[in-house]
Image (cartoon, rainbow, N blue to C red):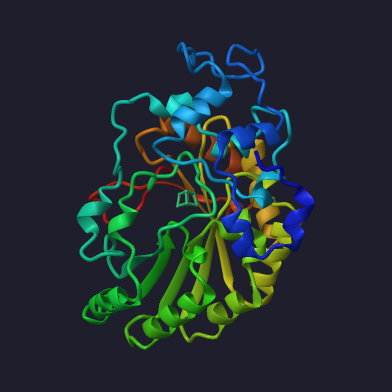
Amino acid sequence: MITRSVASVDSLTWQEQLAGSIRDPKELLHFLKLDSLELDSPELNSPELETPGTESLLGQALAASQDFQLRVPMAYLQRIVKGDINDPLLLQILPLKEELRGAPGYTADPLDEQTANPIPGLIHKYHGRVLLIVSPNCAINCRYCFRRHFPYQDNKPGRNEWQQALDYIAGDDSITEVIYSGGDPLAASDKQLLWLTEEIAQISHVKRLRVHTRLPIVIPDRITDHCLHWLTSTDLLTSLVIHSNHPNELDHHVEAALKKLSNAGVTLLNQTVLLSGINDSVETLQALSEKLFQVGVLPYYLHLLDKVKGAAHFEVSDQLAKQLLTELMARLPGYLVPKLVREMPDHPNKVPLI
Ligand code: SF4
C-alpha cells in the first residue's frame, strides 16, 4: 500500500494531485484510521447494514465501489477528521453498502438527460442554454452524484468532434448561454478550455458562459493564472458556479482560490445538494452561506437530491427541506438564502419548493 503524506500535496501541481487521487478503499480507510471499524460499532450510524461477508467498512467500500469507483484527492482528504466515521466530508465520498440497495423511484438517469443529448457532449434541455460535457472526469466521486451512471464513454468529444457541438450552437440563435459541465469541466486543461471558449465567443448570439465545477473546492490549486486568463479574457459574460455542500470544505486554501477568482472579477455562485446526515441542519446551512459570502461567493441553489440509483440514503424529505429553508430565511438576509429547488425531467426549469 502506498503511504502518502499530506505535506507532499503542497509541492504538487493540480494535475499531479488529480492523478494521485486515492481510489483504493483500503488506502482510504488506513489513512483515516478507520480500517479496523466494524459495522456493529456503536460509532457508526448505519443500523441496517448487516449482511454476512460485508460487515466491515472495508467490505462495504469494496462492494459499493465496484459500480462507481472511489476517488478522492489528498487536498480534500486532509480536511476529513481522522477516526470520525460521521465526518460530513467523508460521508460524501465513502462507498457504503446502502448504495447497493434498490429504492422505488431511483433510476440510472433521474433527469432523463439521455433524451436531451442530441449530439455527443451536448445536452439541450432548457430554453436558451446548452450544456457541454467538457470533461468526463471529476476530481472526486461524490456518492450522491446524479451522473454516476452517465454514459461518459459516448460523450467524450475531442477537438474534431467539438465542431459538431459548435455547429449546433451556431445553428440555433435562441442559445444565448453555454454551460461547461462534466464530469468536471476544470478537469480539462486550460489550453483546451481557452480554445473552446474562443470558439464559442465567435458565435455572435452566445452572450454568456457559465462554468459548473467542484474542482476549486476539491483541489484549490486548480485555480491557476492560466485558468484566470481564459475565464477573464473573453468577451462572454462569465460566471462560475462552485459546488460546496459543507462549511468544513472551505479551508484556507479553498478560500484563497475563491478570493483569486473574485478579485479577478469572476462572478461566483454556489450550489449545494441537501444531503441527509451531511448538511441537513439549519446551523450547517447558515455557516455555509456566511462562509461563502466572506470569500465572494453568493449562495445560488439548494438542490433536493436527484433520485439516482444508489443514493437513496442521502434523501431529505420535502417537509424537512422546507422547514430548513424557512429557518434559514429567519436567520439570514435574503441574498444569503439559496433557492430551494428540485430538478425534474420534462420540466422547462428547476422547480422551486418555496
Ligand atoms: S464533482 Fe460533480 S459531477 Fe463529479 S461526481 Fe461530484 S457531483 Fe458528480
Query: Is residue 217 among what the camera can see?
Result: yes
Check the picture and name the quadrant holding the C terminus.
Answer: top left
Residue at the spot 33% in from the left edge and 86% down from the top edge: 203
Image spot of residue 251 (x, y percent): 73, 52
Say whether residue 238 is left or right of residue 291.
left
- In depth, the one of 254 and 163 nearer the eye is 163
Image spot of residue 234 (x, y percent): 50, 85
Q: Is residue 186 above or below residue 74?
A: below
Residue at the spot 51% in from the left edge and 33% down from the top edge: 95
Image spot of residue 262 (x, y percent): 65, 71
User: Count the marks: how many?
Assistant: 0
User: Residue 56 occupies which quadrant of the picture?
Assistant: top right
Say whether residue 195 is left or right of residue 247.
left
Check the picture and name the quadrant holding the N terminus.
Answer: top right
Image spot of residue 78 (x, y percent): 72, 45
- In depth, the one of 81 and 130 nearer the eye is 81
Query: Is residue 280 among what the camera can see?
Result: no
Q: Residue furthest front?
A: 1
Residue at the spot 58% in from the left edge and 16% down from the top edge: 39
- In depth, the one of 295 and 107 nearer the eye is 107
Q: Is residue 337 above or below residue 163?
A: above
